[in-house]
Image (cartoon, rainbow, N blue to C red):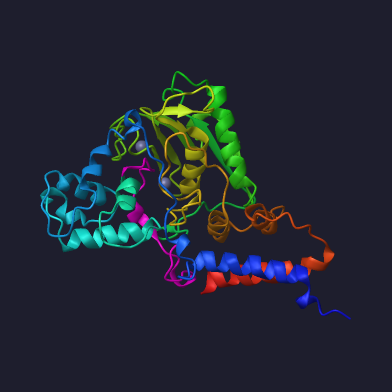
Amino acid sequence: MRFPFFSYYCYYYSVVGLIYVLLFFQIPAFPARKISAPVRVLTADAYNATWGNFEKFIDVGKGSRVSGMSELKQYFHRFGYLSPMKAASFDDVFDDSFQSAVMKYQENLGLPVTGKLDSVTIKQIVTPRCGVSDSIASGAGRWFHITKHFAYFYGHPRWVKSKPITLTYAFAEDHLIDYLSLDEIKAVFRRAFSRWEAVIPMNFTEVEHRVADVRIGFFRGDHGDGEPFDGVLGALAHAFSPENGRLHLDAAETWAVDFKSQKSSVAVDLESVATHEIGHVLGLAHSSVKEAIMYPSLSPRTKKVDLRIDDVVGVQALYGSNPNFKLSSLLESDSTSNQPVDSRTGSCRWAVLTATIFLILWS
Ligand SMILES: [Zn+2]
Ligand SMILES: [Zn+2]
C-alpha cells in the first residue's frame, strides 16, 4: 500500500505550496523576490511630465544638496513618507529623515531597501501610479508578519450590508471623456467589477447616478475633493475607502481600451486602473507585491487586470469567499505547470493550500 503523502503528485504540490509560502514571506533564499522586475524604459515623449525631472537625482547621496530636491520631498510627502508638519519647509538637502523616507518607500514598493536614490528606486518613483497615498494603509494587526503585502485602510472599513452584498454603481455623465463611448467605458468597468465579484460574495449593479453606492467619473485638476489631478501621467486615478464610493480617473490621461487602436506612448489601460481602484472602493489599500492588482504603480501601455493571490486573500478577509471561487484554480493558473489533477492529488493539494493560507494569515 502506498502512503499518499509520499506520492509524486503530493511531492509536486508540496513544492508548489512551499514556493508560494516563501514568496509571501520574502525569505532571503529567494532574493529575486525582493528585486523589482526591470522597469519599463520610457521613450522621450512618454516621460512622465509630472515626475520625469526626478531622474536627475539618480545616485545623489546622503548629505548632498541638489537644487529641486525639495520637489522630490514633496512627492514623498504626498504619498505619505515625510511628515506633513514639514511640508512647507522642505529644503534641497538629502538628510536623515529623507533617507528614512526613502527606505520606507523602498520597503512598501517591494524594492531593495538601500536608503539610496539608486536607479531602481528613481525609475519606480517616476512611474505613473495611483494617487491614493501609501500612508493610509495599515497592516491587519497580528495577521501580518513583518513582511507587508496586502493592506487595508485605517480601521479596516468595509461595506456593511446584508449578504449577499449588492453594491450599485453609476457613471457621472457630465464627467466622461469624448474619445471613448459610454458603452466602451461601461464594458471595461463591467469586466473589472466581475473580477472582484468572482472571489467575494458581492454583486455590482448599475443604477442611475443619484442613488449609486459607487460613483465613477473622469475629472481634471482640482475637482473639489482635496486630491487634485496633475495632468498627463503622474497620478492616474484615485478612489476612496468604504463606504464613500467615489472613484475618479484623471481626465488628462490618454485612456485606452485597446492598445491596437490607441497608439499613444502615454496611453494608460483603463481596465487595469479600474480594477485597481475598485479594490480601494472595497477597502484594500496598496500592496507591496509587484504582481498584485493593488500594487500602486502602472507603466503606460501596460495591461494588468488579473487578481493575484495577494489581492484575493486580502479582499476575502474583509468579505469572505464567493462560494463558487476556488483558490486552487488561481494557484494553478499562477503555476507554470500543466500537471494534470486527479483524485489522488486532491486531499494533498488542499492540505498544502490550507497550510499556505494558514501561514499567511497567522504568522
Ligand atoms: Zn491605489
Ligand atoms: Zn477625486
Tell me residue 12's x, y (percent).
71, 67
The answer to whether residue 213 is seen in the rendering is no
Q: Farthest top residue? A: 178
Q: Specify the principal SS of the magenta part.
A: loop
Residue at x 85% of width, y 79% of height: 2
Horizontally, is 118 left or right of 35 in the view? left
Let me know if residue 347 is in the magenta part: no
Let me know if residue 131 is in the magenta part: yes
Quarter of the image for residue 219 reads: top left
Residue at x 30% of width, y 40% of height: 227
Horizontally, is 294 left or right of 316 in the view? left
- Give the camera-side residue of 94 and 284: 94
Figure check: 89 above or below 171: below
Horizontally, is 150 left or right of 20 in the view? left
Figure check: 110 above or below 25: above
Horizontally, is 345 left or right of 32 in the view? right
Give the magenta part as a residue range: 126-148
Quarter of the image for residue 54 reads: top left
